[in-house]
Image (cartoon, rainbow, N blue to C red):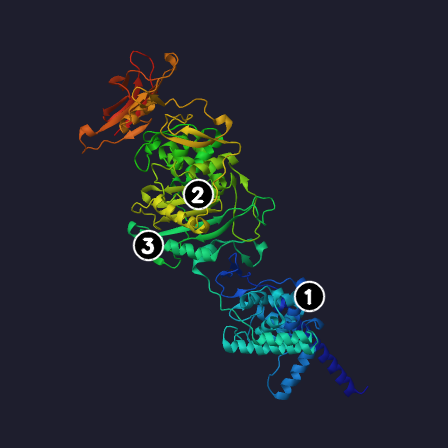
Amino acid sequence: MSPRLARAARLLWRLTLLGLGLSLILGAALWYKTSARVRLEAPAATLRFVDHHGAFLGERADGDDPRLGYWPIDPSALPSRVVAATLAIEDKRFFEHPGVDLKAVARAAMQNLRSGRRVSGASTLAMQLARLQDPAARGWRSKLLEAVTALRLVHRDGHASVLAHYLRIAPYGNNVHGIAYAARRYFDKPLADLSWAQIAFLAGLPQAPGRMNPYTASGKRAAVARGQRILDILRADQVIEAVDWRRARLEIADLRIPPRPTRPPEAIHALLSFDPPASLGPQISTHLDLALQRDLQASLQAQLEGWRADGAGNGALIVVERPSSLDPEAPDGAGRWRLRALIGSADYHAARDHGAIDFTRALRLPGSTLKPFLYAHALEQGALRPTQVMDDLQRARGGVTNADRRFLGPLLPRVALANSRNVPAVELMMRVGLPGFFRLLGELGLHDGEADPRRYGEGLAIGGMPTRLIDLARAYTALAGDGRLASLSRFLGEPLPPARRIFSEGVARRVTLMLSDPMARLPTFPRMGHGELPFAAAIKTGTSSSYRDALAVGWSERYLVLAWVGRPDGQPTRGLSGYRAGAALVGATLRRLHPQARDGVSEGGFPAPEGSQPVSLCALSGQRATSACPSRIIEPLLPQEVPHADCAWHTRDDARGGVSLHLPPRYMAWANERGLPAHAREAPWGPQDEIKVELLTPRPNLRLRLDPDAPAALSTLKLQATVEPPVEQVVFYVDGRPFAVVDPPYTARWPLRPGAHVIEARLPFSDLRSTPVQLIVH
């Protein structure tokens, strides 16, 4: 070999090695540069909510990202027609190349050289996916990175996964991404149900999503033209039959695109509160009824306008449909409590009324709506019997009194609960125990168990513990649902835990009957008022201190309804009670939900406890009613609950031609104050050591403060005792010294004096006495 040829060979060898080295360096740089790009990722799928009729409720995207869609597609179940239409226009040789189509690159290069400008890009679908995930300015550097990324994506994840991810994140106009979501947005159909015409229409949108906007006339024309071209390509490639091609060509020219969906303001609070499980997918079918939601919100707005003068600021409503025995979602027969309406405020956009606050989820005081749980708990524990007389005689412990400042005397549980009396409720809670009742409320989901029950004290019996209306709705399923606590079902097909037994069926039914008896509500609540409906309905109202919160709960055989009215700032209203406002809303809502009742068709009543029989009781004594009893109650009782004796409180007075009232001594003072001609009841009492002396007033550990401006004659404290069996006289002792000798009904008034004092009641000339009571006067 000549020296010249040898030098040329050495130079060529060096250039080859240099080229190889540069190629390795460039390859390593490209490998490093694209490592972070080799991924298949997308924003969280947009949740699309519809009501149980399919009406659009709203969309919820990922955070503040305005882009919508990104619904995942299973790579193993790609719809064949979608694949064919997409690849026909985007990348016909997609499954034949490794991510970069060298034939397309060569063809594009020749076309660009001939024309002297860029007329073809040769980007494959995998390269477009790389650009969608990492957008950058157009140029050969970006193209090179996209090509290497495409090769690595296809090599790592396979063709099917790359195609599925492209179909998930590709743009389809109007901030819509992904063909599955586009199918819902533009045709309100699942992807698998699209026709050839609809698929071809969507397949062309990613090439120019801004220009081919389906919501504008020009954009739709451009999209139709692109779709027709795709159909022609599919026919030329014999992917689509001739008859299907002709039908699709006719259909695509006349496609109807529904108007852009708008979120109804009535459903905003519901959507913001919903947290569907991932297993339901991105298309969420709720149990809400949008038409009902709108109707009830308009009714709430109208009612609130009438209460503005009394300080009403806002309100909330919840409607739950009770389970049906024909429920297809309840193979175990338990059924679902479906949330049909959730109205968090009268108007979400009303800034003056703080409408953006969801008052179904705001902590407010529930008032007397907690009492039914207390009565059910006491009945369950055996601390209360349906025939047991409860006392409504004077302020209860802690100074608790009734809302109307009156005392109704001896009451049966049905009447005490239906009249929502505070005094019997407090005494009942003390009987069952504050910790036990607090635990029950925790089991019902009304608190998280963090607080000490002593924080609420006697106020717990009358609703002094804050809770949320939505939690109260769930808790009431335990009473309305025959004793089983159930979760509220918000979505079609959502997995829910089984209902849990809290009360026995008999106890739950008994409380329901108590609250559905319009006669038992007298005299506190009038007949034919908000709580009396032309069908069986249990109603319970609740009013917090100073009329800050007005609540009501009601249920029929088909629905459970809750309402709240109050001021967003928690300040008092002017007399808006649970009956006046809450029951008005609940009653009107239940009537709206039972249109057949307006036509004179009424449903049956609530079932009684299994094995019970209706028994006529004296409304005063709880014993078997006789012809002498002026007021009676029909109570369903089990055989072991039926009283053995007839009423001894009412007897016929043949001499006077009327009825004589004989009361136990503890009720004599109450009877005298009401002007009732009562006598202390006599009975075959035992020896003296069985006589019971009790000091009713004052309560133990009472603390009083003297008003320096009040006349001395008005600064007195009522002393009251009861003795069973009755005796002729009782002596009140103050600080160990006799103060007053009194006859039945054993009352006196003691002038207040500063200091610590001990008061007791004694029988004259006897060692029998009451338990001493200590008090302090400041």
Q: Which residue is mark 1?
A: 158
Between residues 433 and 121, which one lies in front from this camera angle? Answer: 433
Residue 37 visible in image: no
Q: CA distance from mark 3 to mark 2?
A: 27 Å
Q: Mark 3 is on which residue type? A: Glu
Residue 63 horizontal/vertical position (percent): 49, 60
Marks 3 and 2 close (CB-CB < 8 Å): no
Residue 769 horizontal/vertical position (percent): 33, 17
Tell me which label, 1 or 3, sits earlier in the chain.
Answer: 1
327 in relation to 142, above or below? above
Q: Which residue is mark 3?
A: 305
Tell me which label, 2 or 1, sits earlier in the chain.
Answer: 1
* Label 3 CA crowd tier, 10 Å (few <14, some 14–19, many 20+): few
Q: Residue most toward the right?
A: 1
Residue 611 visible in image: yes
Q: Mark 1 is on which residue type? A: Gly
In the picture, the quarter occupied by the C terminus is top left
Residue 699 horizontal/vertical position (percent): 32, 27
Q: Which residue is mark 2?
A: 537
* Label 1 CA crowd tier, 10 Å (few <14, some 14–19, many 20+): some
Q: Secondary structure at mark 1?
A: loop
| Left or right placement of residue 559 versus residue 309 in this view | right
Marks 1 and 3 close (CB-CB < 8 Å): no
Between residues 80 and 636, which one lies in front from this camera angle? Answer: 636
In this rendering, the label closer to the viewer, 1 or 3: 3
Q: Secondary structure at mark 2?
A: loop
Q: Residue at x 33, y 13 (%)?
A: 767
In the picture, the quarter occupied by the N terminus is bottom right
In this rendering, the label closer to the viewer, 3 or 2: 2
Q: CA distance from mark 1 to mark 3?
A: 63 Å
